[in-house]
């Protein structure tokens, strides 16, 4: 393990530390600036109730006790160690812990890129853009189990990849515990597990020499996931009659997506209502403005989380929407064309497919929130880094050489602008918070 930690030069380590420290300071400042304790938080009171029951009544709640009490208990058991729930000091402490989870996931992104031999400056640029994206800041400053489960997904992905590159049994032990902790944090870890197994199958086809490692990884993940069985059969089943209970039935019908393919189409990409979240409208009582597009919702929440920019969408918001989409399209086409990032491309679309499958069987607008698949920031980072770090030495003619000078340069400019825009948007949100 000591040699594993010495893989990278001191310079890369210090740059990574600076990246993480910068993130922590920015996120903590964002938390401190919030005048209301429930600002920028998904299902805040339901998650707080879960922790409060554990801390004050010294028991695990029944799935029927509250709106969020059907979740597995790990996140709330950790939160219950922070005293004085449901006080403001307790809430800030738990949200600060989410910042730590964000730092862990950011380390996973940075480590993954370095492991793929991406140049340090590119790894830093890509990691910085992702970590300042409003949805990333939102996710990792909330009182919500999505923060912890996403960090655990990042850990599982990194250690699985490390084992695939160079098999060592201690890596499997970490993967097993990350999986076990993940399924006891949130059921969405099982969506990640499904994509993981699909990736293993594809890997066995394209890299048959590593089939033994891949099969070992799959078995480890499956065994780790089965540790959830006692919770399902001895807690959920006796209390509710279901192995996977949820409380979506209490949502208003206005939040229901139609179970047709039209629900997955972006109907009017130039209409502001397509990109505003349904929670804003629900709070305002404007039920007639509920959108029914999965594409709009998942893209909106991938950029902004649940930030309440509502109907007042400025030029900066639109610029971020369209430039982010342009960067994504460039990433898809370029990685598909070159083949260097095809596996990352497969992982990303497999993750999107898992989200669509979940929405199809649970057709409520909240089901299409990007936070359930926020671990996809990892393959997105790989796709972007591969383009920026693409080597022109293997290209056969000058036309391709020129195109691969233009494409990375263009994407670099877009990412640089998005990094600046993210900070401007962040400062704008801070300004609004301080004024309220």
Image (spheres, grey):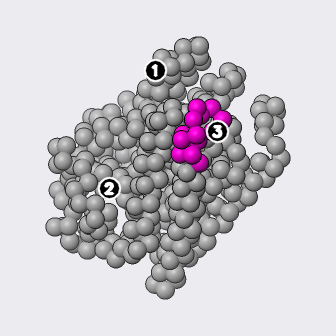
In the image, what residue occupies the spot 33% across and 72% down?
A: 310
Which disc, if any, is residue 167?
none
Q: Is residue 217 above or below residue 76?
A: above
Magenta stretch contains residue 3: no
Span of residues in magenta: 392-405
Q: Position of residue 351 (x, y in %)?
A: 41, 38
Residue at the extreme front: 398
The residue to which callout 1 is attached is 201
The residue to which callout 3 is attached is 391
Residue at the extreme bottom: 435
- The answer for how far apart the CA atoms under marks 3 and 1 are is 29 Å
Contact between marks 3 and 1 (CB within 8 A): the answer is no
The residue to which callout 2 is attached is 297
Q: Nearer the viewer, residue 222 or 389?
A: 389
In the image, what residue occupies the spot 53% across and 45% down?
A: 403
Q: Dot 3: few (<14), some (14–19), or many (≥20) neighbours within 10 Å?
A: few
């Amino acid at each position: 393990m000591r040699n594993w930690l010495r893989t990278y030069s001191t310079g890369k380590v210090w740059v990574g530390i600076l990246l993480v420290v910068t993130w922590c300071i920015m996120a903590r400042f964002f938390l401190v600036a919030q005048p209301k304790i429930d600002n920028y938080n998904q299902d805040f009171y339901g998650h707080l109730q879960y922790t409060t029951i554990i801390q004050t009544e010294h028991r695990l709640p029944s799935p029927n006790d509250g709106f969020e009490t059907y979740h597995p208990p790990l996140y709330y058991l950790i939160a219950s160690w922070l005293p004085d729930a449901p006080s403001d000091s307790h809430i800030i402490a738990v949200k600060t812990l989410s910042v730590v989870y964000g730092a862990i996931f950011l380390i996973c992104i940075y480590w993954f890129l370095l492991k793929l031999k991406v140049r340090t400056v590119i790894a830093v640029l890509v990691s910085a853009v992702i970590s300042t994206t409003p949805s990333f800041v939102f996710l990792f400053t909330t009182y919500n189990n999505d923060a912890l489960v996403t960090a655990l997904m990042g850990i599982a992905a990194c250690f699985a990849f490390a084992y695939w590159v160079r098999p060592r049994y201690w890596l499997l032990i970490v993967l097993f515990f990350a999986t076990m902790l993940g399924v006891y944090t949130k059921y969405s870890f099982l969506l990640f597990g499904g994509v993981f197994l699909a990736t293993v199958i594809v890997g066995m086809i394209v890299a048959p020499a590593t089939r033994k490692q891949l099969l070992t990884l799959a078995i480890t993940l499956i065994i780790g996931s089965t540790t959830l069985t006692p919770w399902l059969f001895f807690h959920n089943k006796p209390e509710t009659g279901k192995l996977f209970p949820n409380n979506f039935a209490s949502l208003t019908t206005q939040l229901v997506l139609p179970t047709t393919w039209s629900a997955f189409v972006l109907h009017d990409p130039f209409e502001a209502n397509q990109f505003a979240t349904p929670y804003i409208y629900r709070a305002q009582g404007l039920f007639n403005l509920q959108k029914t597009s999965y594409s709009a919702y998942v893209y909106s929440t991938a950029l902004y989380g649940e930030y309440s920019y509502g109907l007042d969408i400025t030029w900066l918001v639109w610029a971020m929407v369209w430039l982010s989409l342009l960067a994504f399209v460039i990433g898809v086409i370029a990685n598909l064309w070159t083949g260097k990032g095809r596996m990352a491309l497969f992982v990303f679309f497999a993750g999107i497919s898992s989200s669509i499958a979940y929405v199809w069987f649970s057709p409520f607008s909240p089901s299409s929130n990007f936070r359930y698949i926020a671990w996809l920031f990892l393959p997105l980072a790989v796709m972007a880094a591969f383009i920026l770090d693409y080597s022109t030495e293997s290209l056969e003619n000058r036309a391709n050489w020129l195109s691969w000078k233009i494409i990375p340069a263009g994407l670099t400019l877009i990412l640089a602008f998005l990094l600046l825009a993210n900070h401007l948007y962040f400062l704008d949100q801070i300004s609004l918070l301080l004024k309220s």
